[in-house]
Image (spheres, grey):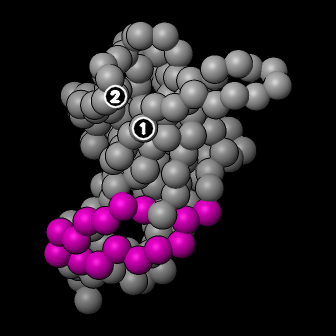
């Protein structure tokens, strides 16, 4: 089989819900719950392995390091299949400012090779916290030069 037969996965924020959590230390701490939606645009299945999501204020500079990855074992079938990944992220969100939601999904192709895909979206400060893909958000070029920490893949 030729290399172009492999899986090609993209992902990004799907459903979002803003809630307030009451706790001992932080009263009315606002958080946003983000469900990740992923799609396989390749010709063979993709086997999801890990996923991470971060949230930060809008910036033109580099984004913060990735938060720790969560295990995510699922299969994305080929030919433009799309689904919600069974992992929710609850992240603190502050004020009424637009923010950047960024992340990375790691998957294997049918040949056992590991691949990754990154995204960055603008989360609007409106009631529904709608998202807009930022320029170049699915081209992982913006993500190659990032300093990696122990939780990032090699």
Q: Is residue 108 left or right of residue 91?
A: left
Q: Position of residue 49 (x, y in %)?
A: 54, 67
Q: CA distance from mark 1 to mark 2?
A: 8 Å
Main secondary structure type of the part rendered in magenta: strand
Q: Label 1's element?
A: strand
For the residues labelled 1 and 2, say whether their Cβ atoms are less than 8 Å apart. yes
Residue in the picture at 53% in, 15% down: 94
Q: Residues within 10 Å of mark 2 (few under 14, many from 20)?
A: some
Query: The magenta stretch spans which residues?
Result: 71-85
Residue in the picture at 57% in, 28% down: 20
**What residue sits right under mark 2 in the picture?**
129
Q: Is residue 144 left or right of residue 141?
A: right
Residue in the picture at 81% in, 21% down: 25
Q: Would you identify the image quadrant in which residue 77 lies?
A: bottom left
Q: Identify which residue, 67 or 128, lies in the foreground.
A: 128
| Magenta span contains residue 72 | yes
Q: Label 2's element?
A: loop
Residue 23's place in the image compared with 111, above or below, is above
The numbered mark at residue 17 is 1
Q: Position of residue 93 (x, y in %)?
A: 52, 23
């Amino acid at each position: 089989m030729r290399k172009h037969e492999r899986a090609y996965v993209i992902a990004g924020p799907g459903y979002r819900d803003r809630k307030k959590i009451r706790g001992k230390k932080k009263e009315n701490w606002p958080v946003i719950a983000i469900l990740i939606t992923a799609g396989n645009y390749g010709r063979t299945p993709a086997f999801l392995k890990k996923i991470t999501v971060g949230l930060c204020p809008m910036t033109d500079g580099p984004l913060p390091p990735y938060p720790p990855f969560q295990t995510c074992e699922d299969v994305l079938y080929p030919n433009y299949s799309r689904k919600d990944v069974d992992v929710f992220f609850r992240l603190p969100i502050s004020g009424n400012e637009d923010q950047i939601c960024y992340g990375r999904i790691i998957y294997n192709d049918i040949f056992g090779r590991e691949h990754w895909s990154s995204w960055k979206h603008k989360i609007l400060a409106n009631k529904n916290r709608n998202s807009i893909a930022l320029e170049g958000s699915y081209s992982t070029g913006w993500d190659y030069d990032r300093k990696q920490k122990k939780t990032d893949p090699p």
